[in-house]
Amino acid sequence: MRILLCLFAVTSSLWAADRPLSFRHDVLPVLSKAGCNGGGCHGALAGKGGFRLSLNAYDPATDHYNITRELRGRRVEFNEPARSLFLIKPTAAVRHKGGKVLHEDSEDYQILLKWIQQGAPAPSDKDAQLTRLELTPGNARVKKGDTPQLKVTAHFSDGTRRDVTPWAKFDSTDASVAVVNEKTGRAEVIGFGQGAITAWYSGQITMARLTSPWPHQIPDTAFAAGPKANLVDRHVLSQLRELNLKPSPAATDSEFIRRAYLDTIGVLPKPSEVRAFLADQAADKRNKLIDQLLARPEFVDYWTYRWADLFLISGKKLRPNALKAYYTWLRGEIAKNTPWDQLVRQVVTARGDSFENGATNFYAVHQEPETMAENVSQAFMSLSINCAKCHNHPLEKWTNDQYYAFANLFARVRVKGWGGDARNGDGKRTLFIASRGDLLQPRTGKPQPPAPLDRPAIAANADRRAVLADWLTAPDNPYFTRSIANRVWANFFGQGIVDPVDDLRVSNPASNEPLLQGLAKHLVDNKYDLKALMRLILTSDTYARSSAPLPENIGDTRYHARYYPRRLMAEVLQDAITSVTKVSPKYANITLSDGSTAKTDFYKDGTRALQLFDSAVTSYFLKTFGRNEREITCECERSNKPSMVQVLHLSNGKTLNENLRAEQSSVTPLVTKANAALIEEAYLLCLARPPSAEETQRLEAVFKATPATERRAVVEDLFWALMTSREFLFQH
């Protein structure tokens, strides 16, 4: 507390000096800290009580006008500043719906009063600019129960710096590790792990990391990397050592083969493949398995489907032939292992016939410059800039001007036959680039000079998207490479190093920043070869760890001391059921955006869920188990969370029960097999492992006691039990 009082004392002495006050850096931070320009108060779209401020002070010039000039300047009294409506309202000297948010004896009140006394100077281009924020301590090792006081220092372009702690807004990125008083900046460490505290002031955000190790006593030998450990393991083990988390041992061969198959190609291994792998005594058999999986045709199916979520390939948005062209183009690029930067460049700069060049359909899905910009940013940089369309981004550094500068890069994209609806006509479009045309910035009514994010405006160009593509895919673009590296990692571990994967903002830090940087560098060094990145991840000791927790890592949910179980994604689970039962679902209809259905002949009998072109295919199972509907570019559209509806569907629904009863079911040939062979085959089919001796013994006793007339029913029950178990339904 004495530290905080000291801070205020220093601050008071600064304000006591008769220096000119800045509307931008003195007055607006007071309003922001008090919540006056928040979305629930005067920062709302329509304002409150006839008084409107820009949300989080994104438009200082308009705010100054509304305070000093609107309503004939009634809000400020230069002759008697203390009687200004601007002061007596927040102090509740007169009726104020927001209550008392400012106290007369506070430093904030004195700042506003002095500003009016100085003539309420307006913001100027000559004002010193805020260049950076410094939060101290920046990185601190703490322990549970500690209450560190954080300090925010603002650095300005004129060389001055100022303690702005009282006017900064604080937040914690992980409340399970530490919480923070949003007004004072005093943190409290309440758990274990690595958390971060963010501080926001005058439109900028800075962050400090707090490391709170678990109280385990782990011998250093537990962190010794094996001979095949790679950069993944080095970074993960370094963090585990810092946090006192003991890594779990390696998964068994049965666990590994099942895990690798499902994560890499989306199918279960066949019993023959499991037997061969378990019998192989070669020391490098796991690495050989990875190479085989990366070369299989199912790899193309799986990753085409995964990236189709990103590209929004959906029959709800596109006509059938356009949809097929879009999917075929993407599948062809995956089959060729086209480097990610080249693939994205094809999309961003696409032009021509939508049937001949499927990549152009990206622009059929996004037909306005604003939506084009938003989705390019979200899909290829994991940055949500949407909020900056109306005001400066409240959680990120992107400004309203930057939004319209970025969107203006797409202002000259034209398509013959759009008609405002991607599903009108036959879907055939011709995309071209106009020689003129700009997007107006609504706030100014003038075009915002086109510019990539964090870059100066570009010169006139026949196709601005070419400049965008150069910037976007450049190796030094920190967003592009980190985004795809993080997405690939999330596929294999169920969560991103930055999680959610669509949210790479400053205030959502990576759980292991050196690891993410290492993966990004590896990707650049390997010329954006995604298979090379996948091989790196798959051959790491980190990926191969057991999912069984140890007493020394049971509290870990982010740092990969063990492999984290998760429910299979809807399409993989559907295909797993199909591969076990040998009964394929029918995909004969698609559901349109208005809820109606239409016939489709795209999918012949035997088509797997991962071979479907789009998420509009009508499937109660896939919908129930949370497939990505591809309405927006966001992995949040997909859900792997279990639900009661899912439980009931598996227990009593048609998918399992009718498949097992079918004559062509895998159950039929197994009924006549000897008990031990039947049991082993069932376990290998469903769980990719042989049964234990105890499991075999117990089940053999059941079959011996079963009348011949009921044998098939018992075999069906065995399969049902295995396929409704957590071991089948979850990746582990």
Image (cartoon, rainbow, N blue to C red):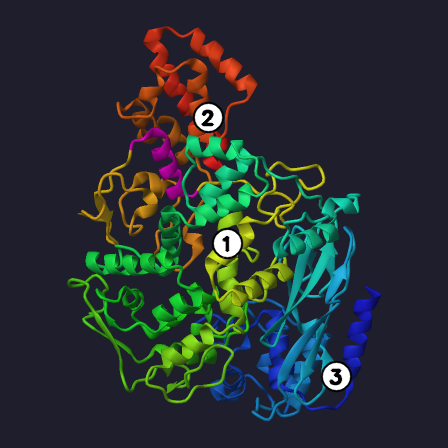
- Residue 319 in the image: state x and y as whole percent: 21, 58
Amino acid type indicated by mark 2: Tyr
Residue 8 is covered by the magenta coloring? no
Amino acid type indicated by mark 3: Trp
Q: Main secondary structure of the magenta part?
A: helix
* Residue beneath the point at 33% across and 82% down: 463
Q: Which residue is mark 2?
A: 683
Q: Earlier in the sequence, mark 3 or mark 1?
A: 3
Helix, strand or loop at label 1? It is helix
| Res 642 visible | yes
Which residues make up the magenta segment? 569-583
- Residue 171 in the image: state x and y as whole percent: 63, 62
Amino acid type indicated by mark 1: Met
- Asked whether, in this view, residue 366 is left or right of residue 262, the answer is left
- Residue 546 in the image: state x and y as whole percent: 60, 39
| Between marks 3 and 2 in the image, the one whose residue lies nearer the viewer | 2
* Residue beneath the point at 23% across and 53% down: 594
Q: Which residue is mark 1?
A: 534
Which mark is on residue 657?
none
Quarter-of-image position of residue 64: bottom right
Which mark is on residue 15?
3
